[in-house]
């Protein structure tokens, strides 16, 4: 009874003030809910480098994945490499100082809480790079979590411009080789950069990349991504076998021409091909995305892999049969 009386007293109070009764219609249509604005996202480049130990509870990539999940980030690209460290005593390790040169800043960086520990565990020097899209509201949170999750690594976070989801989806479709009518290449918007992929294979030599990079610069082309793989050739199948330190190398280079007006595709292909042959590459493929449909890309890649297999066969046949050091 007391609760019922309280209900009616509350209703009377609302009526006296011209307010609608609870649960009653006001006679007016509620205003339409405002459309939610799309989540603003930005691209971030994250680098992690330094020394880490090999233990059962230490997995850097798992840690990165958990950080990205926590802040709602989506990894777009990632790469990493490592090398085993020589075990040294504390007296041989300059007092156990884990610091790193940072020449652009004119200083040395020391990870938080860095110290020589985990004696007896294998240690590795690592360098990781992650490109991810992240909600703008979580930018500072990601920086904080990364630095506290990996206190013994030097971590840098660089943020780029805001993402345009629709524009990025359209650009991705174009880069992926979506064809126009009857398989014709779909033209790129005039304000978009022109992209392509270069594949180079041959004996690994010092200075090859420097020569290729110089030619690309002369052609007003920049490197977006570089994947270098070294390895060996199989004596039976003439296939390329990935293995660090091998005498053969394959380079997959994603490139872009930011100034479309200054880009000359014919000159670009001729000069890159000539330079690649000059520095020892024996299998070469150059595909410009705007000028290639899917059928042409498949044919180009098939020719490249056949040429790579032929190069491996020639390399094996010309190698000194008494020299097994490269096997």
Image (cartoon, grey):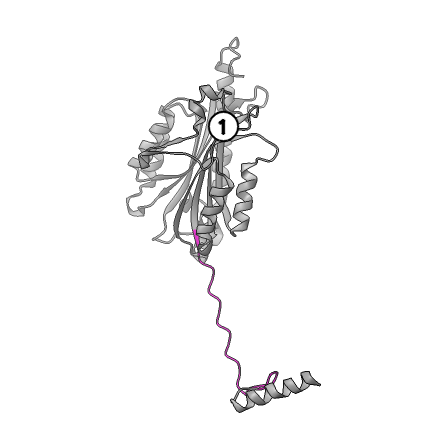
Q: Where is residue 168 in the image (x, y as percent from the top left)?
A: 44, 53
Q: Quadrant of the N terminus?
A: bottom right
Q: Give the magenta range.
A: 21-42
> At x 55% / y 41%, what residue is drawn?
63
Q: Position of residue 324 (x, y in %)?
A: 53, 12
- How many badges with numbers are in the image? 1
Query: Is 278 included in the stretch rendered in magenta?
Result: no
Query: Is 31 included in the stretch rendered in magenta?
Result: yes
Nearer to me, 62 or 230:
62
Image quarter for residue 57?
top right
**Residue tagged 1:** 116
Give above or below for 274 relative to 193.
above
Specify whether residue 272 is in view. yes
Nearer to me, 207 or 107:
107
Give above or below for 101 relative to 29.
above
Q: Position of residue 311 (x, y in %)?
A: 48, 23
> At x 32% / y 37%, what residue is drawn?
105
Dominant secondary structure of the residues highlighted in magenta in the image: loop
Q: Position of residue 99 (x, y in %)?
A: 41, 31
Q: Is mark 1 on a helix, strand or loop?
A: loop
Nearer to me, 233 or 19:
19
Specify whether residue 179 is in view. no
- Mark 1 Cα-neighbour bin, 10 Å: few <14, some 14–19, many ≥20: some
The extreme right residue here reads 1
> At x 42% / y 23%, what residue is drawn?
94
């Amino acid at each position: 009874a007391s609760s019922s009386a309280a209900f009616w007293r509350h209703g009377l109070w609302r009526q006296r003030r011209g307010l609608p009764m609870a649960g009653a219609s006001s006679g007016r249509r509620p205003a339409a809910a405002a459309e939610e604005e799309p989540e603003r996202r930005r691209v971030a480049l994250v680098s992690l480098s330094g020394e880490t130990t090999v233990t059962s509870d230490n997995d850097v990539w798992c840690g990165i994945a958990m950080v990205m999940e926590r802040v709602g980030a989506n990894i777009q690209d990632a790469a990493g490499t490592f090398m085993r460290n020589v075990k040294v005593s504390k007296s041989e390790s300059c007092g156990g100082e884990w610091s790193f040169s940072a020449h652009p800043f004119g200083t040395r960086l020391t990870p938080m809480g860095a110290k020589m520990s985990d004696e007896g565990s294998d240690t590795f020097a690592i360098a990781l790079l992650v490109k991810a899209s992240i909600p703008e509201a979580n930018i500072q949170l990601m920086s904080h979590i990364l630095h506290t999750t990996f206190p013994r690594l030097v971590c840098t976070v660089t943020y780029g411009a805001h993402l345009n989801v629709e524009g990025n989806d359209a650009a991705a479709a174009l880069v992926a080789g979506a064809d126009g009518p009857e398989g014709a290449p779909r033209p790129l918007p005039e304000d978009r950069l022109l992209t392509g992929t270069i594949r180079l294979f041959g004996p690994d030599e010092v200075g090859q990349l420097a020569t290729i990079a110089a030619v690309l610069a002369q052609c007003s082309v920049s490197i977006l991504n570089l994947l270098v793989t070294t390895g060996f050739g199989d004596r039976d199948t003439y296939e390329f076998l990935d293995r660090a330190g091998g005498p053969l190398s394959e380079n997959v280079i994603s490139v872009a021409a930011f100034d479309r007006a200054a880009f000359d595709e014919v000159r670009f292909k001729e000069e890159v091909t000539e330079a690649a042959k000059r520095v020892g590459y024996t299998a070469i493929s150059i595909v410009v995305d705007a000028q290639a449909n899917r059928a042409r890309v498949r044919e180009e890649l098939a020719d490249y892999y056949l040429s790579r297999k032929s190069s491996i066969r020639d390399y094996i046949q010309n190698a000194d049969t008494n020299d097994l050091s490269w096997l």
